[in-house]
Amino acid sequence: MNPLENQPAAPPPLRMPLSRPRWTYILIGIIAVVFLLEEIAGSGNGGSQNPEVLIQFGANYAPLVSAGQYWRLFTANFLHIGIVHILLNAYSLYIIGQEVEAWYGASRFMAIFLLTCISGAIASFAMTYGLSAGASTGIVGLIGAEAAFFIRNRKIFGALGSRRLNNLLFIGLINVIYGLSNPQIDNFGHLGGLIGGLTLGWLLCPYYQIEQRSDGTRRVIDLNSLKAEWLGVVLFGALLVVTFYAALTLHHA
């Protein structure tokens, strides 16, 4: 007699509803092209590390933002200062971007990245008066979004989610230590991106639950309401506008 004959078959493994990353690669391509243009524009005169080139291309520079060039809060996130800067950010975006886009899908991913870029730029504008640029505000925002994802879905992922959260916490700790030890790092921009990422990540996060079907099979479903999600995004955008004008008032005081 085979002792395994009467044992029920193990249920088939659950498949998570993942999206294929595309925009991550497009964003990396965009910052690479912009960096090349920076280098060409500043050829023989510092390239992308030339402050005049950075300002020309749209870096976040408080005196010019205060003067009405608000678009710099957006464009600054696609500029980089030197080859090491862009390589680090491109690699970070490649690693974390693929994961977040796979979990959240393209539209949620882009909303999180772009809005956390802006939330970081506003924080930098509000708290500093220097020149800043780089996609790291949005990348830190994606880290915050992934943390929100595993916190909210901790029942589904269990120990795997806990390990991933510990990894994200370790990465965040390393960035904080490095940022505090290097005066050139825009820590306020990173903080603004992280807060934005945690907030938007929670609002837009797929909230998974396992559904048992009548035929005995199981599937993973997303319980989050799209209407509620995008209402939250609109409210977050409104909060960014209010925060920016409060910072603008302080700069003009």
Image: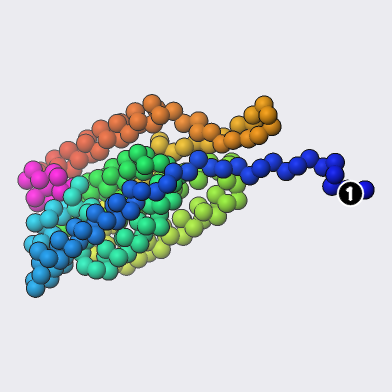
Residue 76 position, x and y percent, is 19, 53
Name the amino acid type tagged 1. Answer: Asn
Is 205 or 151 nearer to us in this picture?
A: 205
Residue 42 position, x and y percent, is 10, 67
Q: Which quarter of the rendering shows the C terminus?
A: top left
Q: Please say whether residue 29 is visible from this viewpoint.
A: yes
Is 205 or 195 nearer to us in this picture?
A: 205
Q: Please say whether residue 194 is visible from this viewpoint.
A: no
Q: Quadrant location of residue 51?
A: bottom left
The residue that mark 1 highlights is 2
Relative to 118, does residue 79 appear above or below in the rendering?
Answer: below
Residue 29 position, x and y percent, is 27, 56
Q: Is residue 65 magenta?
A: yes
Residue 87 position, x and y percent, is 30, 65
Q: Quadrant location of residue 69?
A: top left
Q: Residue at x 79, y 40 (%)?
A: 8
Q: Quick one: SS at disc 1?
A: loop
In the picture, measured across the screen, residue 249 lies left or right of residue 108, that is left
Q: Residue at x 35, y 31 (%)?
A: 230
Q: Is residue 157 magenta?
A: no
Q: Residue at x 44, y 51 (%)?
A: 99
Q: Residue at x 24, y 60 (%)?
A: 32
**Region rendered in magenta:** 61-73
Q: Quadrant location of residue 171?
A: bottom left
In the picture, measured across the screen, residue 221 lies left or right of residue 235, that is right
